[in-house]
């Protein structure tokens, strides 16, 4: 096609002048644009809306608001369902929703405005610019935390701790929020190695904006972004207008009404807005930083925001992934940029496809199921069938998969350190040669065929048509890593023996501990029926009590997580205090059980019972030592 078009160009002079040729060419582009626009007729959007309504009904989503926009205007605006179920109030064009973490991209855009003005650089060390903000990085002399690390989530900081999540920070300044609990801002690995999602980074970046601009961050965003885009009602605070028009947020399966959350880090998730106003923000990206005739950011800056540069994978030349609070991903083979967000009672999604000149924003006033299905439905309506690809279609010929990529990998990072204890054992993936292609398989999950798209870069496609890149890379010390740039996945290569040793050891310990409960349920009734005294009963009872207390701690933790986690663990409740107490009792009775098991060898006792009690005790010791090393024993969640 291309060759024949290029061949045709020289012969055009035989039939018309250059002016005539340009007129014909321009008319051709208009025709192509018109033909493309027909892909988004009323039927397309009607079918999409019907599908969205079915998803809402299936997942009990009260209300949804969605806008589809091109570079010039809104193509579709849908106000579906209820904004307030108690009063039966429908979602309207004026209904506002909380956009959650999409707010982070406004912090990045604000920083880039100052970068373009020459006031700061992305490579500036934050300890030099804002020495008054506390953080810890033991590699600061060689690998300082830079502004770019805050926005690409490569600082290594732990995500916000529980007490930061539960604190209502109404009326707090940005600095007060940062001074409240700086413990979470601790680099757990060298900054610039791994992407690990962290809500404190954009807040620190917002404080830099305040210091460099001399005005509160929210005022900076209003003057430099909201007002030029016509987002006149969007607000970080629950203003009178927001309070009047904000949809009710619902949480849990029972759709409990969620109170307004004055989050500690407003720049990371506090914006309230409408689909109409956020559509203008989407057009800002589609037009590569321009709003009508006004340019807010240079097009090269927008490109920089969409592509990471600080992770090991990015330094190796992989540009897909999480950039400056904007992620680049692929759906059905089409490049999609954007961000999603969640708040207590709300979920939101923003995406745009620059190559297609179209984008979307949608909200739901529930934090339950159905969000991903809504987004896939919107994307599927916008992507023409002619552009749909599979991961196999994106394979680059001539690139062979490096055999060194084969092997076992375990999680090297965790978004929240409190969950690292489980990830180290269960978050494991395996890459190996298959019958025709290499295979990628997370532990105990389905396997995926992977395809080479770049040197040391593989890609696989999930059943939901999301494409996930896998990047094999080494650090400066020779450690081998597998990174998934879009999903905070960072794995370090290990041996299959170590993987299965840990899994088997954990499994054996859990089985032995469970057997203690089963044995107790058997021997107590038997002894009561036979009315025979039990010799050295402490050797039987103490291991059981240790297991019982751990079981209670786990049950309370799971019950608390299944409800309102912030409410259940952010203060002294039956869940938080129970977990604290029972975890301590578990260790105490494990120690007593170990002592009793050893002295039991000098007491008359059934040999099989003695051996079983000792094995259960040793299992409790292993679990105790591991949980103690992870800081979970005696964890006071209300001050964590």
Image: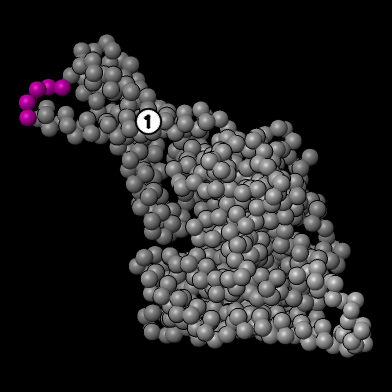
Residue 431 at x, y = what percent? 56, 40
Q: Please give the range of residues in magenta.
A: 529-534
Query: Is 531 colored magenta in this rendering?
Result: yes
Q: Residue at x 49, y 73 (%)?
A: 364
Given residues 455 and 423, the one toward you in this image is 455
Q: Residue at x 78, y 40 (%)?
A: 141
Is residue 347 something that shows in the picture? no
Name, please, the residue furthest toward the left: 530
Given residues 24 and 600, the one toward you in this image is 24
Predominant secondary structure, magenta span: loop
In the rendered image, which residue does mark 1 sit on?
Answer: 509
User: Which of the 4 image quarters holds residue 291?
Assistant: bottom right
User: Which of the 4 image quarters holds residue 507?
Assistant: top left
Quarter in which the N terminus is drawn: bottom right
User: Which of the 4 image quarters holds residue 137?
Assistant: top right
Residue 538 at x, y = what percent? 24, 24
Callout 1: SS? helix
Q: Residue at x 37, y 30 (%)?
A: 509
């Amino acid at each position: 096609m291309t060759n024949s078009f290029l061949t045709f160009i020289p012969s055009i002079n035989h039939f018309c002048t250059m002016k005539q040729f340009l007129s014909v060419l321009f008319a051709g582009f208009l025709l192509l644009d018109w033909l493309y626009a027909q892909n988004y007729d009323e039927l397309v959007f009607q079918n999409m809306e019907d599908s969205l309504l079915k998803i809402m009904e299936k997942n009990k989503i009260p209300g949804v608001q969605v806008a589809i926009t091109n570079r010039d205007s809104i193509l579709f605006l849908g106000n579906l369902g209820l904004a307030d179920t108690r009063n039966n109030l429908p979602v309207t064009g004026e209904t506002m929703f909380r956009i959650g973490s999409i707010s982070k991209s406004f912090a990045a855009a604000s920083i880039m405005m100052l970068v373009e003005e020459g006031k700061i650089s992305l490579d500036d060390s934050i300890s030099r610019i804002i020495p008054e903000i506390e953080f810890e990085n033991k590699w600061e002399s060689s690998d300082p935390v830079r502004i770019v690390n805050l926005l690409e989530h490569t600082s290594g900081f732990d995500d916000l701790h529980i007490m930061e999540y539960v604190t209502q920070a109404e009326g707090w300044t940005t600095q007060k929020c940062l001074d409240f609990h700086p413990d979470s801002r601790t680099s757990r690995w060298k900054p610039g190695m791994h992407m690990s999602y962290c809500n404190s980074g954009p807040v620190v970046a917002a404080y830099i904006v305040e210091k460099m601009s001399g005005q509160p961050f929210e005022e900076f965003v209003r003057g430099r972004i909201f007002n030029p885009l016509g987002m006149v009602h969007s607000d970080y605070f629950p203003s009178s207008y927001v309070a009047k028009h904000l949809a009710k947020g619902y949480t849990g399966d029972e759709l409990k009404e969620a109170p307004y959350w004055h989050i500690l880090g407003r720049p990371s998730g506090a914006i309230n807005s409408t689909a109409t106003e956020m559509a203008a923000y989407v057009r800002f990206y589609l037009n590569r930083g321009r709003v009508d005739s006004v340019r807010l950011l240079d097009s090269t800056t927008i490109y920089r925001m969409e592509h990471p540069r600080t992770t090991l994978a990015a330094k190796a030349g992989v540009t897909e992934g999480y950039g400056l609070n904007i992620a680049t991903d692929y759906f059905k083979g089409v490049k999609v940029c954007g961000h999603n967000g969640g708040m207590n009672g709300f979920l939101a999604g923003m995406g745009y496809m620059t190559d297609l000149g179209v984008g979307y924003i949608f909200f739901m006033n529930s934090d339950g199921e159905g969000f991903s299905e809504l987004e896939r439905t919107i994307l599927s309506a916008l992507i023409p069938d002619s552009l749909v690809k599979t991961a196999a279609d994106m394979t680059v010929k001539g690139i062979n998969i490096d055999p060194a990529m084969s092997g076992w990998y375990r999680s090297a990072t965790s978004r929240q350190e409190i969950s690292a204890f489980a990830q180290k054992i269960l978050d494991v993936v395996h890459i190996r040669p298959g019958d025709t292609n290499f295979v990628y398989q997370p532990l105990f999950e389905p396997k995926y065929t992977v395809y080479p798209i770049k040197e040391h870069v593989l890609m696989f496609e999930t059943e939901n048509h999301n494409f996930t890149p896998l990047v094999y890379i080494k650090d400066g010390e020779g450690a081998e890593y597998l990174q998934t740039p879009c999903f905070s996945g960072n794995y370090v290569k290990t041996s299959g023996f170590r993987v299965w040793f840990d899994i088997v050891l954990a499994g054996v310990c859990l089985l032995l501990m469970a057997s203690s409960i089963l044995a107790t349920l058997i021997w107590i009734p038997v002894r009561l029926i036979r009315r025979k005294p039990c010799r050295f009963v402490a050797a039987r009872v103490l291991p059981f009590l240790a297991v019982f207390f751990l079981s209670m701690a786990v049950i309370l933790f799971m019950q608390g997580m299944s409800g309102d986690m912030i409410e259940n663990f952010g203060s002294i409740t039956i869940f938080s205090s129970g977990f604290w107490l029972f975890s301590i009792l578990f260790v105490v009775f494990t120690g007593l059980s170990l002592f009793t098991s050893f002295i039991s060898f000098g007491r008359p006792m059934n040999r099989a019972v003695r051996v079983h009690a000792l094995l259960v005790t040793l299992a409790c010791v292993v679990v105790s030592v591991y949980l103690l090393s992870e800081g979970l024993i005696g964890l006071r969640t209300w001050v964590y």
